[in-house]
């Protein structure tokens, strides 16, 4: 395991974690988009899986990992991360590799647990930063339909300032945008902009990875007065659409390479316009080097978006430490310098968050 060590050279601004406020300089190495606890089972669709009688009850086990590598949504159990003890065990791989801070992207409707995050932070000694807001439209609570954008934005402000039972959010996100980007999701984006302007909090936007909806999402936030350096557009590295990524970068926003460790060839029976193939980590690193050479180093964030059981070490995956343990050496082999790596793992996420 590679232990990453970087020098602290950040100015002293503050950021709220689930255990209280810390200085910007205390963030250290940041994983800017992970899921410590998560429940995506609402999105499970039971389809026939060769060799499995009941995929809705079948647990993730060694013998079915190959099935999940060709359809990571095949088993309902793979979509649930709800074991705090396991979360502590898995996050310690990240800490032991040199990680300091984890930005948790789970929201109400997909398993966010403020108290659970605090317990896990205390048990690991890691900084954990909780998000506020709402995920994709399918998970929105009914009450939002009768609320104004100002009122929805105030809900986010309240969680950023006062917290949930005293546990404060530290950023806005991941705000959800579906394959079919509709008006109810646009309302939440505009509400997020309102909350940002009242608090200065950074915004992370989930985009369906096989679409280019990040362009419209970024424009909505920018038109609402959010500064580009406070916007992060996620999931741009599933297919490595260069023209899409470059268009985002030209707007001044952060782009997030957050699918490291996901190298799936999705079987054609379950593929659709919103669920397709994944490129390999080697291709992601090659594109990273190209974007850095084009002058976009300061707008790139790196993480794994660990959101499935089969991505954990316990279930045969690379874990939360994958970027530090495996991708950093790959970046070095590609000619990316230690200073550039430090910028993407330490300085950029701190600048975005603070």
Image (cartoon, rainbow, N blue to C red):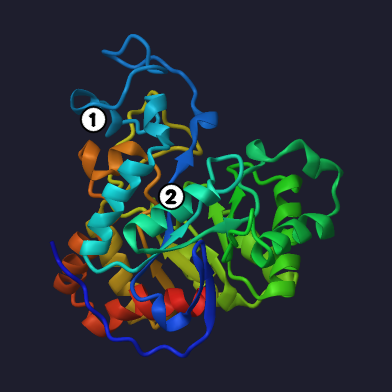
Residue that badge 1 annotates: 65
Using the image as rendered, state which of residue 250 and residue 39 is in the foreground. Answer: 39
Residue 189 badge: none
N-terminal label among 1 and 2: 2
Secondary structure under the numbered disc 1 in the rendered image: helix
Q: How many marks?
A: 2
Q: Is 151 drawn above or below residue 232 in the view shown?
A: above
Q: What separation in Å lies between label 1 and label 2 (alpha carbons)?
A: 20 Å
Residues at discs 1 and 2 in contact (Cβ within 8 Å): no
Measuring 69% from the left and 40% from the top, which residue is drawn there? Answer: 140
Q: Is 128 drawn above or below residue 341 in the view shown?
A: above
Give the class, few, some or many, for how many residues have Cα within 10 Å of label 2's Cα (few <14, many ≥20).
many
Quarter of the picture containing the C terminus is: bottom right
Residue that badge 2 annotates: 35
Measuring 47% from the left and 32% from the top, which residue is drawn there? Answer: 272
Instruction: Judge from the rendering whether residue 68 lies leftward or rightward of residue 245; answer left or right.
Output: left
Q: Residue 54 is drawn in which quadrant? A: top left
Measuring 58% from the left and 74% from the top, which residue is drawn there? Answer: 230
Using the image as rendered, state which of residue 322 and residue 27 is in the foreground. Answer: 27
Indicate the position of residue 281 as horizontal and vertical percent values: 25, 55
Indicate the position of residue 342 as horizontal and vertical percent values: 30, 79
Indicate the position of residue 299 as horizontal and vertical percent values: 45, 76
Indicate the position of residue 295 as horizontal and vertical percent values: 39, 83
Secondary structure under the numbered disc 2 in the rendered image: loop
Using the image as rendered, state which of residue 120 and residue 178 is in the foreground. Answer: 120
């Amino acid at each position: 395991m590679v232990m990453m060590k970087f020098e602290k050279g950040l100015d002293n601004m503050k950021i709220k974690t689930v255990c209280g406020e810390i200085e910007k300089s205390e963030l250290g190495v940041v994983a800017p988009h992970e899921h410590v606890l998560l429940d995506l089972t609402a999105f499970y669709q039971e389809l026939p899986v060769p060799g499995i009688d009941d995929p809705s009850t079948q647990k993730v086990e060694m013998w079915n990992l190959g099935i999940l590598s060709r359809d990571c949504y095949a088993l309902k159990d793979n979509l649930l991360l709800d074991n705090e003890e396991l979360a502590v065990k898995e996050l310690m791989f990240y800490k032991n590799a040199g990680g300091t801070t984890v930005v948790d992207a789970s929201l109400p409707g997909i398993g966010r647990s403020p108290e659970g995050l605090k317990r896990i932070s205390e048990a690991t000694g890691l900084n954990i930063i909780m998000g506020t807001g709402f995920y994709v439209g399918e998970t929105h609570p009914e009450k939002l339909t009768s609320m104004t954008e100002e009122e929805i934005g105030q809900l986010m402000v309240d969680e950023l300032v006062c917290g949930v039972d005293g546990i404060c959010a530290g950023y806005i996100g991941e705000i959800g945008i579906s394959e079919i980007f509709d008006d109810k999701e646009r309302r939440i984006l505009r509400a997020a902009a309102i909350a940002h302007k009242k608090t200065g909090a950074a915004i992370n936007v989930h985009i369906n990875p096989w679409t280019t909806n990040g362009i419209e999402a970024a424009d909505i936030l920018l038109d609402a007065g959010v500064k580009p350096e406070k916007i992060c557009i996620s999931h741009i590295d599933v297919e490595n659409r260069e023209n899409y990524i470059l268009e985002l970068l030209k707007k001044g926003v952060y782009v997030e390479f957050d699918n490291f460790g996901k190298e799936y060839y999705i079987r054609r029976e379950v593929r659709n316009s919103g669920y397709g193939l994944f490129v390999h980590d080697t291709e992601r690193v090659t594109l990273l080097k190209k974007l850095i050479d084009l002058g976009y180093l300061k707008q790139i964030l790196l993480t794994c978006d660990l959101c499935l059981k089969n991505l954990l070490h316990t279930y045969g995956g690379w874990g939360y430490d994958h970027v530090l343990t495996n991708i950093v050496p790959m970046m070095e082999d590609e000619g990316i310098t230690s200073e550039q790596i430090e910028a993407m793992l330490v300085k950029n996420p701190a600048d975005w968050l603070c």
